[in-house]
Image (tube, rainbow, N blue to C red):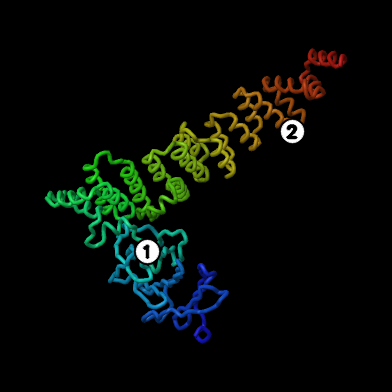
Protein backbone atom coordinates (compact mmCIF):
# COMPACT_ATOMS: atom_id res chain seq x y z
CA UNK A 1 0.00 0.00 0.00
CA UNK A 2 2.83 2.40 0.86
CA UNK A 3 4.49 1.79 -2.50
CA UNK A 4 1.22 2.23 -4.41
CA UNK A 5 -0.10 5.35 -2.64
CA UNK A 6 3.22 7.04 -1.83
CA UNK A 7 4.08 8.85 1.41
CA UNK A 8 2.46 12.23 2.13
CA UNK A 9 4.13 12.86 5.48
CA UNK A 10 6.38 11.08 7.97
CA UNK A 11 7.32 11.66 11.60
CA UNK A 12 10.27 10.21 13.52
CA UNK A 13 9.81 9.32 17.19
CA UNK A 14 11.72 7.49 19.90
CA UNK A 15 10.63 4.39 21.81
CA UNK A 16 12.12 1.89 24.22
CA UNK A 17 12.86 -0.31 21.21
CA UNK A 18 14.78 2.36 19.31
CA UNK A 19 13.97 4.99 16.70
CA UNK A 20 10.53 4.66 15.15
CA UNK A 21 8.85 6.24 12.15
CA UNK A 22 5.18 6.85 11.32
CA UNK A 23 3.93 7.62 7.81
CA UNK A 24 0.74 9.00 6.29
CA UNK A 25 0.05 7.53 2.85
CA UNK A 26 -1.79 8.99 -0.11
CA UNK A 27 -4.80 6.87 0.85
CA UNK A 28 -4.92 8.81 4.16
CA UNK A 29 -3.97 5.74 6.20
CA UNK A 30 -1.36 5.63 8.96
CA UNK A 31 1.36 3.00 9.30
CA UNK A 32 4.22 2.90 11.77
CA UNK A 33 7.17 0.89 13.03
CA UNK A 34 8.68 1.24 16.50
CA UNK A 35 12.19 0.26 15.39
CA UNK A 36 13.64 1.10 11.97
CA UNK A 37 16.46 -1.41 12.52
CA UNK A 38 13.85 -4.18 12.54
CA UNK A 39 11.45 -2.75 9.99
CA UNK A 40 7.95 -4.15 10.48
CA UNK A 41 5.27 -1.72 9.37
CA UNK A 42 2.01 -1.90 11.30
CA UNK A 43 -1.06 -0.39 9.69
CA UNK A 44 -3.22 1.62 12.07
CA UNK A 45 -7.06 1.55 12.00
CA UNK A 46 -8.80 3.73 9.43
CA UNK A 47 -10.15 7.13 10.46
CA UNK A 48 -13.85 7.35 9.47
CA UNK A 49 -14.52 9.92 6.74
CA UNK A 50 -10.91 11.07 6.38
CA UNK A 51 -10.73 12.40 2.82
CA UNK A 52 -7.79 14.77 3.19
CA UNK A 53 -4.65 14.99 5.36
CA UNK A 54 -5.36 15.98 9.00
CA UNK A 55 -4.58 19.53 10.05
CA UNK A 56 -2.01 18.19 12.52
CA UNK A 57 -1.01 14.85 13.99
CA UNK A 58 1.51 13.43 16.44
CA UNK A 59 2.90 10.08 17.51
CA UNK A 60 2.95 9.45 21.27
CA UNK A 61 4.89 6.60 22.83
CA UNK A 62 5.08 5.67 26.48
CA UNK A 63 5.39 2.41 28.43
CA UNK A 64 5.63 0.36 25.21
CA UNK A 65 2.32 1.77 23.95
CA UNK A 66 2.40 3.82 20.75
CA UNK A 67 -0.61 5.77 19.54
CA UNK A 68 -1.37 8.39 16.88
CA UNK A 69 -3.30 11.51 17.82
CA UNK A 70 -4.71 13.58 14.95
CA UNK A 71 -6.99 16.58 14.44
CA UNK A 72 -9.57 16.54 11.66
CA UNK A 73 -11.57 19.75 11.50
CA UNK A 74 -13.18 20.25 14.91
CA UNK A 75 -12.51 16.67 16.04
CA UNK A 76 -9.58 15.01 17.77
CA UNK A 77 -9.04 11.29 17.07
CA UNK A 78 -6.86 8.70 18.77
CA UNK A 79 -5.56 5.63 16.91
CA UNK A 80 -4.25 2.64 18.84
CA UNK A 81 -3.52 -0.91 17.73
CA UNK A 82 -7.15 -1.96 17.53
CA UNK A 83 -9.48 1.01 17.17
CA UNK A 84 -10.06 4.65 16.32
CA UNK A 85 -11.57 6.69 19.16
CA UNK A 86 -12.99 10.23 19.25
CA UNK A 87 -11.22 12.13 22.03
CA UNK A 88 -12.71 15.62 21.62
CA UNK A 89 -15.58 16.51 19.33
CA UNK A 90 -17.54 19.70 18.68
CA UNK A 91 -20.19 20.45 19.76
CA UNK A 92 -20.33 17.13 21.67
CA UNK A 93 -17.50 16.51 24.16
CA UNK A 94 -16.77 12.97 25.24
CA UNK A 95 -14.97 12.74 28.61
CA UNK A 96 -12.33 10.14 29.20
CA UNK A 97 -10.18 9.38 32.26
CA UNK A 98 -7.89 12.33 31.69
CA UNK A 99 -9.00 15.93 31.54
CA UNK A 100 -9.22 18.04 28.40
CA UNK A 101 -9.38 21.80 28.62
CA UNK A 102 -10.61 23.41 25.40
CA UNK A 103 -10.64 27.10 24.70
CA UNK A 104 -12.87 28.51 21.92
CA UNK A 105 -11.48 29.86 18.63
CA UNK A 106 -9.48 33.04 18.90
CA UNK A 107 -6.90 34.90 16.91
CA UNK A 108 -3.34 33.77 17.52
CA UNK A 109 -1.96 36.86 15.80
CA UNK A 110 -2.74 39.44 18.45
CA UNK A 111 -4.06 40.03 21.97
CA UNK A 112 -7.26 38.25 22.88
CA UNK A 113 -10.35 40.49 23.17
CA UNK A 114 -11.40 38.65 26.31
CA UNK A 115 -10.10 35.77 28.43
CA UNK A 116 -10.83 32.49 26.64
CA UNK A 117 -13.48 30.49 28.43
CA UNK A 118 -12.38 27.15 29.77
CA UNK A 119 -14.59 24.09 29.39
CA UNK A 120 -13.84 20.79 31.05
CA UNK A 121 -14.48 17.25 29.93
CA UNK A 122 -13.56 13.84 31.32
CA UNK A 123 -12.06 11.42 28.76
CA UNK A 124 -11.78 7.65 29.05
CA UNK A 125 -10.63 5.74 25.94
CA UNK A 126 -8.86 2.46 26.73
CA UNK A 127 -5.54 3.64 25.30
CA UNK A 128 -5.41 6.67 27.60
CA UNK A 129 -6.62 5.02 30.79
CA UNK A 130 -3.90 5.30 33.41
CA UNK A 131 -1.51 7.07 30.99
CA UNK A 132 -0.46 10.63 30.32
CA UNK A 133 0.55 11.61 26.79
CA UNK A 134 1.41 15.32 27.07
CA UNK A 135 1.71 17.45 23.93
CA UNK A 136 3.35 20.67 22.86
CA UNK A 137 2.12 23.04 20.16
CA UNK A 138 1.52 21.66 16.67
CA UNK A 139 1.15 18.17 18.07
CA UNK A 140 4.73 17.58 19.19
CA UNK A 141 5.16 15.21 22.11
CA UNK A 142 6.40 16.70 25.38
CA UNK A 143 9.07 14.69 27.16
CA UNK A 144 8.82 16.50 30.49
CA UNK A 145 5.76 14.55 31.59
CA UNK A 146 3.64 17.69 31.87
CA UNK A 147 0.60 18.77 29.86
CA UNK A 148 0.57 21.23 27.01
CA UNK A 149 -1.63 22.60 24.21
CA UNK A 150 -2.30 21.33 20.72
CA UNK A 151 -2.80 24.25 18.33
CA UNK A 152 -4.82 23.59 15.20
CA UNK A 153 -6.72 26.06 13.03
CA UNK A 154 -7.33 28.78 15.59
CA UNK A 155 -8.19 26.38 18.41
CA UNK A 156 -6.29 25.19 21.45
CA UNK A 157 -6.90 21.82 23.09
CA UNK A 158 -5.10 21.07 26.35
CA UNK A 159 -4.82 17.46 27.46
CA UNK A 160 -3.91 17.01 31.11
CA UNK A 161 -3.84 14.01 33.37
CA UNK A 162 -6.24 14.54 36.27
CA UNK A 163 -4.38 14.33 39.57
CA UNK A 164 -5.51 11.89 42.22
CA UNK A 165 -6.77 14.58 44.60
CA UNK A 166 -8.98 16.09 41.88
CA UNK A 167 -10.29 12.69 40.84
CA UNK A 168 -11.18 11.79 44.43
CA UNK A 169 -13.09 15.02 45.00
CA UNK A 170 -14.89 15.47 41.68
CA UNK A 171 -15.72 11.95 40.56
CA UNK A 172 -19.41 11.03 40.60
CA UNK A 173 -20.81 9.92 43.97
CA UNK A 174 -17.41 10.28 45.62
CA UNK A 175 -17.26 9.61 49.36
CA UNK A 176 -13.65 10.78 49.68
CA UNK A 177 -13.04 13.04 52.69
CA UNK A 178 -12.20 15.98 50.43
CA UNK A 179 -15.47 15.58 48.50
CA UNK A 180 -17.48 15.44 51.75
CA UNK A 181 -15.73 18.51 53.11
CA UNK A 182 -16.46 20.42 49.90
CA UNK A 183 -20.14 19.50 50.16
CA UNK A 184 -20.17 20.41 53.87
CA UNK A 185 -18.85 23.87 53.10
CA UNK A 186 -21.42 24.41 50.33
CA UNK A 187 -24.23 23.36 52.64
CA UNK A 188 -22.86 25.64 55.37
CA UNK A 189 -23.12 28.59 53.01
CA UNK A 190 -26.75 27.62 52.40
CA UNK A 191 -27.24 27.49 56.20
CA UNK A 192 -28.29 23.87 55.87
CA UNK A 193 -28.06 21.26 58.65
CA UNK A 194 -26.50 18.85 56.14
CA UNK A 195 -23.23 20.65 56.68
CA UNK A 196 -23.06 19.25 60.22
CA UNK A 197 -23.93 15.75 58.97
CA UNK A 198 -21.16 15.75 56.37
CA UNK A 199 -18.70 17.16 58.89
CA UNK A 200 -19.56 14.58 61.52
CA UNK A 201 -19.13 11.79 59.01
CA UNK A 202 -15.60 13.00 58.25
CA UNK A 203 -14.72 13.51 61.92
CA UNK A 204 -16.06 10.10 62.93
CA UNK A 205 -13.59 8.53 60.49
CA UNK A 206 -10.83 10.85 61.81
CA UNK A 207 -10.15 12.00 58.26
CA UNK A 208 -10.63 15.73 58.66
CA UNK A 209 -6.89 16.62 58.31
CA UNK A 210 -6.74 14.45 55.19
CA UNK A 211 -9.85 16.17 53.80
CA UNK A 212 -8.32 19.61 54.30
CA UNK A 213 -5.03 18.55 52.69
CA UNK A 214 -6.95 16.98 49.78
CA UNK A 215 -8.85 20.21 49.09
CA UNK A 216 -5.66 22.28 49.26
CA UNK A 217 -3.85 19.96 46.87
CA UNK A 218 -6.76 19.78 44.42
CA UNK A 219 -7.00 23.59 44.31
CA UNK A 220 -3.50 23.72 42.88
CA UNK A 221 -4.44 21.58 39.88
CA UNK A 222 -7.53 23.61 38.97
CA UNK A 223 -7.39 26.33 36.31
CA UNK A 224 -10.70 28.06 37.06
CA UNK A 225 -10.37 30.67 39.86
CA UNK A 226 -13.93 29.96 41.01
CA UNK A 227 -13.14 26.27 41.50
CA UNK A 228 -9.90 27.17 43.27
CA UNK A 229 -11.75 29.49 45.64
CA UNK A 230 -14.40 26.88 46.35
CA UNK A 231 -11.79 24.28 47.30
CA UNK A 232 -9.79 26.73 49.41
CA UNK A 233 -12.94 27.87 51.21
CA UNK A 234 -13.67 24.22 52.00
CA UNK A 235 -10.11 23.76 53.32
CA UNK A 236 -10.40 26.91 55.44
CA UNK A 237 -13.78 25.70 56.75
CA UNK A 238 -12.31 22.32 57.71
CA UNK A 239 -9.27 23.91 59.43
CA UNK A 240 -11.57 25.58 61.93
CA UNK A 241 -12.40 22.17 63.44
CA UNK A 242 -8.79 20.94 63.74
CA UNK A 243 -6.50 21.77 66.63
CA UNK A 244 -3.03 22.94 65.64
CA UNK A 245 -3.36 22.37 61.90
CA UNK A 246 -0.17 23.80 60.28
CA UNK A 247 -1.20 26.82 58.15
CA UNK A 248 1.94 26.94 55.98
CA UNK A 249 0.63 24.67 53.23
CA UNK A 250 -2.64 26.60 52.93
CA UNK A 251 -0.88 29.98 52.82
CA UNK A 252 1.71 28.77 50.32
CA UNK A 253 -0.99 27.38 48.03
CA UNK A 254 -2.88 30.68 48.11
CA UNK A 255 0.31 32.49 47.12
CA UNK A 256 1.13 30.05 44.34
CA UNK A 257 -2.37 30.23 42.88
CA UNK A 258 -2.38 33.99 42.90
CA UNK A 259 0.89 33.99 40.95
CA UNK A 260 -0.37 31.32 38.54
CA UNK A 261 -3.64 33.15 37.89
CA UNK A 262 -1.72 36.35 37.19
CA UNK A 263 0.51 34.76 34.54
CA UNK A 264 -2.36 32.72 33.04
CA UNK A 265 -4.24 35.92 32.24
CA UNK A 266 -4.88 36.25 28.50
CA UNK A 267 -2.84 39.47 28.37
CA UNK A 268 0.21 37.62 29.78
CA UNK A 269 -0.34 34.25 28.14
CA UNK A 270 1.83 31.84 30.18
CA UNK A 271 -0.58 28.94 30.91
CA UNK A 272 1.60 27.02 33.36
CA UNK A 273 0.16 24.18 35.41
CA UNK A 274 0.90 23.90 39.11
CA UNK A 275 3.33 21.01 38.47
CA UNK A 276 5.19 22.97 35.79
CA UNK A 277 5.37 26.01 38.05
CA UNK A 278 6.94 24.01 40.87
CA UNK A 279 9.46 22.33 38.58
CA UNK A 280 10.30 25.62 36.91
CA UNK A 281 10.87 27.47 40.24
CA UNK A 282 9.95 31.10 40.84
CA UNK A 283 13.43 32.31 39.83
CA UNK A 284 13.10 30.86 36.33
CA UNK A 285 9.55 32.20 35.98
CA UNK A 286 10.79 35.69 36.87
CA UNK A 287 13.55 35.33 34.26
CA UNK A 288 10.92 34.49 31.63
CA UNK A 289 8.82 37.51 32.59
CA UNK A 290 11.93 39.69 32.36
CA UNK A 291 12.80 38.31 28.91
CA UNK A 292 9.28 39.25 27.80
CA UNK A 293 9.80 42.71 29.37
CA UNK A 294 6.92 42.25 31.80
CA UNK A 295 8.83 44.14 34.46
CA UNK A 296 5.85 45.51 36.49
CA UNK A 297 4.31 42.06 36.90
CA UNK A 298 7.66 40.53 37.85
CA UNK A 299 8.21 43.21 40.49
CA UNK A 300 4.70 42.77 41.92
CA UNK A 301 5.28 39.02 42.20
CA UNK A 302 8.58 39.61 44.03
CA UNK A 303 6.93 42.02 46.44
CA UNK A 304 3.97 39.70 47.00
CA UNK A 305 6.18 36.68 47.71
CA UNK A 306 8.54 38.87 49.78
CA UNK A 307 11.62 37.72 47.95
CA UNK A 308 14.94 39.25 48.99
CA UNK A 309 15.89 42.50 47.25
CA UNK A 310 18.96 41.03 45.57
CA UNK A 311 17.12 37.92 44.37
CA UNK A 312 13.99 39.77 43.32
CA UNK A 313 13.29 43.47 42.77
CA UNK A 314 16.90 44.61 42.44
CA UNK A 315 17.69 42.03 39.79
CA UNK A 316 14.57 42.90 37.78
CA UNK A 317 15.25 46.64 38.00
CA UNK A 318 18.80 46.02 36.77
CA UNK A 319 17.40 44.15 33.74
CA UNK A 320 14.97 47.00 33.13
CA UNK A 321 17.78 49.56 33.24
CA UNK A 322 19.90 47.52 30.82
CA UNK A 323 16.93 47.48 28.44
CA UNK A 324 16.33 51.20 28.96
CA UNK A 325 19.84 52.18 27.81
CA UNK A 326 19.21 50.49 24.47
CA UNK A 327 16.39 52.91 23.62
CA UNK A 328 17.68 55.48 21.15
CA UNK A 329 14.67 57.82 21.15
CA UNK A 330 15.69 59.69 24.31
CA UNK A 331 18.74 61.76 25.16
CA UNK A 332 21.52 60.49 27.42
CA UNK A 333 20.53 62.99 30.11
CA UNK A 334 16.89 61.86 30.14
CA UNK A 335 17.75 58.15 30.24
CA UNK A 336 20.31 58.56 33.02
CA UNK A 337 17.87 60.65 35.09
CA UNK A 338 15.02 58.15 34.55
CA UNK A 339 17.20 55.23 35.61
CA UNK A 340 18.41 57.02 38.72
CA UNK A 341 14.88 58.06 39.65
CA UNK A 342 13.67 54.46 39.41
CA UNK A 343 16.67 52.71 40.97
CA UNK A 344 17.90 55.25 43.51
CA UNK A 345 20.03 53.50 46.13
CA UNK A 346 18.29 50.12 45.80
CA UNK A 347 20.50 47.41 47.39
CA UNK A 348 22.16 45.06 44.96
CA UNK A 349 22.05 47.46 41.99
CA UNK A 350 25.34 47.95 40.16
CA UNK A 351 25.36 51.12 38.08
CA UNK A 352 28.69 50.06 36.59
CA UNK A 353 27.03 47.01 34.97
CA UNK A 354 24.31 49.21 33.50
CA UNK A 355 26.95 51.67 32.29
CA UNK A 356 28.89 48.81 30.72
CA UNK A 357 25.75 47.80 28.79
CA UNK A 358 25.31 51.40 27.64
CA UNK A 359 28.93 51.48 26.46
CA UNK A 360 28.43 48.21 24.57
CA UNK A 361 25.45 49.87 22.85
CA UNK A 362 27.69 52.72 21.70
CA UNK A 363 26.43 55.30 24.23
CA UNK A 364 29.67 56.35 25.91
CA UNK A 365 28.36 59.64 27.31
CA UNK A 366 25.38 57.87 28.86
CA UNK A 367 27.76 55.34 30.42
CA UNK A 368 29.80 58.16 31.98
CA UNK A 369 26.67 59.81 33.38
CA UNK A 370 25.53 56.50 34.89
CA UNK A 371 28.93 55.98 36.50
CA UNK A 372 28.37 59.21 38.42
CA UNK A 373 25.73 57.33 40.41
CA UNK A 374 28.07 54.40 41.15
CA UNK A 375 29.24 54.77 44.78
CA UNK A 376 32.16 52.30 44.46
CA UNK A 377 35.24 53.79 42.83
CA UNK A 378 36.65 50.33 42.32
CA UNK A 379 33.76 49.70 39.90
CA UNK A 380 34.00 53.11 38.22
CA UNK A 381 37.70 53.19 37.37
CA UNK A 382 38.09 49.95 35.33
CA UNK A 383 35.17 50.87 33.10
CA UNK A 384 36.48 54.41 32.57
CA UNK A 385 39.82 52.95 31.53
CA UNK A 386 38.01 50.61 29.15
CA UNK A 387 36.24 53.62 27.64
CA UNK A 388 39.64 55.37 27.26
CA UNK A 389 38.71 58.09 29.74
CA UNK A 390 41.96 57.70 31.63
CA UNK A 391 42.19 61.24 33.03
CA UNK A 392 38.69 60.99 34.48
CA UNK A 393 39.59 57.58 35.86
CA UNK A 394 42.66 59.10 37.55
CA UNK A 395 40.52 61.79 39.19
CA UNK A 396 38.05 59.18 40.48
CA UNK A 397 40.88 57.00 41.79
CA UNK A 398 42.41 59.92 43.70
CA UNK A 399 39.02 60.85 45.15
CA UNK A 400 38.62 57.30 46.44
CA UNK A 401 41.84 57.51 48.49
CA UNK A 402 42.80 54.00 47.36
CA UNK A 403 46.54 54.09 46.54
CA UNK A 404 46.41 50.74 44.75
CA UNK A 405 43.70 52.11 42.47
CA UNK A 406 45.78 55.23 41.79
CA UNK A 407 48.83 53.13 40.93
CA UNK A 408 46.69 51.06 38.55
CA UNK A 409 45.54 54.16 36.65
CA UNK A 410 49.03 55.76 36.63
CA UNK A 411 50.67 52.65 35.16
CA UNK A 412 47.86 52.43 32.61
CA UNK A 413 48.50 56.08 31.63
CA UNK A 414 52.21 55.40 31.35
CA UNK A 415 51.60 52.64 28.81
CA UNK A 416 48.94 54.62 26.95
CA UNK A 417 50.58 58.09 26.63
CA UNK A 418 53.94 59.25 25.38
CA UNK A 419 56.41 60.26 28.08
CA UNK A 420 55.97 64.02 27.73
CA UNK A 421 52.17 63.92 27.86
CA UNK A 422 52.32 61.43 30.71
CA UNK A 423 54.53 63.72 32.81
CA UNK A 424 52.33 66.75 32.04
CA UNK A 425 49.26 64.80 33.17
CA UNK A 426 50.91 63.94 36.47
CA UNK A 427 51.87 67.61 37.02
CA UNK A 428 48.16 68.42 37.26
CA UNK A 429 47.60 65.70 39.88
CA UNK A 430 50.02 66.23 42.82
CA UNK A 431 48.83 63.10 44.65
CA UNK A 432 49.42 60.91 41.62
CA UNK A 433 52.81 62.57 40.99
CA UNK A 434 53.94 61.97 44.57
CA UNK A 435 52.93 58.30 44.43
CA UNK A 436 54.64 57.82 41.07
CA UNK A 437 57.85 59.37 42.45
CA UNK A 438 57.77 56.88 45.31
CA UNK A 439 57.33 54.09 42.79
CA UNK A 440 60.24 55.29 40.65
CA UNK A 441 62.61 55.56 43.65
CA UNK A 442 62.34 51.82 44.10
CA UNK A 443 61.70 50.59 40.56
CA UNK A 444 62.79 53.09 37.86
CA UNK A 445 65.42 55.56 39.05
CA UNK A 446 66.28 56.81 35.55
CA UNK A 447 62.66 57.71 35.01
CA UNK A 448 62.79 59.67 38.25
CA UNK A 449 65.64 61.80 36.85
CA UNK A 450 63.64 62.54 33.70
CA UNK A 451 60.70 63.50 35.84
CA UNK A 452 62.78 66.02 37.82
CA UNK A 453 64.15 67.47 34.62
CA UNK A 454 60.66 67.83 33.17
CA UNK A 455 59.52 69.58 36.35
CA UNK A 456 62.66 71.79 36.62
CA UNK A 457 63.02 70.54 40.18
CA UNK A 458 66.74 71.30 40.54
CA UNK A 459 66.96 70.58 44.24
CA UNK A 460 65.56 67.07 43.93
CA UNK A 461 67.67 66.56 40.81
CA UNK A 462 70.79 67.48 42.79
CA UNK A 463 69.82 65.13 45.58
CA UNK A 464 69.32 62.43 42.99
CA UNK A 465 72.86 62.84 41.60
CA UNK A 466 74.42 62.91 45.11
CA UNK A 467 72.56 59.74 46.03
CA UNK A 468 73.57 58.11 42.77
CA UNK A 469 77.25 58.93 43.35
CA UNK A 470 77.26 56.95 46.56
CA UNK A 471 75.61 53.97 44.93
Q: Residue furthest right?
A: 469
**Percent x, y of residue 398:** 63, 24
Per the image, label 1 sits on a secondary structure element best described as: strand
Location of residue 86 by image quarter: bottom left
Image position of 190 (left or right of 261): left
Identity of the residue drawn at 39% across and 78% down: 82
> Few, some or many C-alpha atoms within 10 Å of disc 1 (few <14, some 14-19, many ≥20)?
many
Q: Secondary structure at mark 2?
A: helix
Q: Residue at x 45, y 45 (%)?
A: 283
Q: Neighbour class for label 2 at 10 Å: few (<14), some, many (≥20)?
A: few
Figure disc tally: 2
- The one nearer the camera, 150 or 416, is 150
CB contact under 8 Å: marks 1 and 2 = no
The residue lying toward the viewer, choosing from 346 and 461, is 346
In the rendered image, the quadrant that contains the C terminus is top right
Using the image, determine if residue 154 lies above or below residue 338.
Answer: below
Q: Which residue is mark 1?
A: 159
Amino acid sequence: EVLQNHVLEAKVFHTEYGTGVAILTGAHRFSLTTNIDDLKLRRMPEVPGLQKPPSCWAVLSQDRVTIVLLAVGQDLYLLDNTSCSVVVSEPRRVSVGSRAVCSPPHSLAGPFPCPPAVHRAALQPPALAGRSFPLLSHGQACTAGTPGPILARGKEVRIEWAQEASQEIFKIASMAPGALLLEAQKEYEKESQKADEYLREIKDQKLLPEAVSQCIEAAGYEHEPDTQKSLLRAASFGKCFIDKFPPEGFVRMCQDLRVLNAIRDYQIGIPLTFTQYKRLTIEVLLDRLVLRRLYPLAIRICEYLRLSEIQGVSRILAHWACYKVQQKDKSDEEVAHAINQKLGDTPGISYSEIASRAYDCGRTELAIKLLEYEPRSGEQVPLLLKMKRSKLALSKAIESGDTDLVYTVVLHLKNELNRGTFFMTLQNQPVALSLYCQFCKHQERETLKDLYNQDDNHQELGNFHVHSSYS
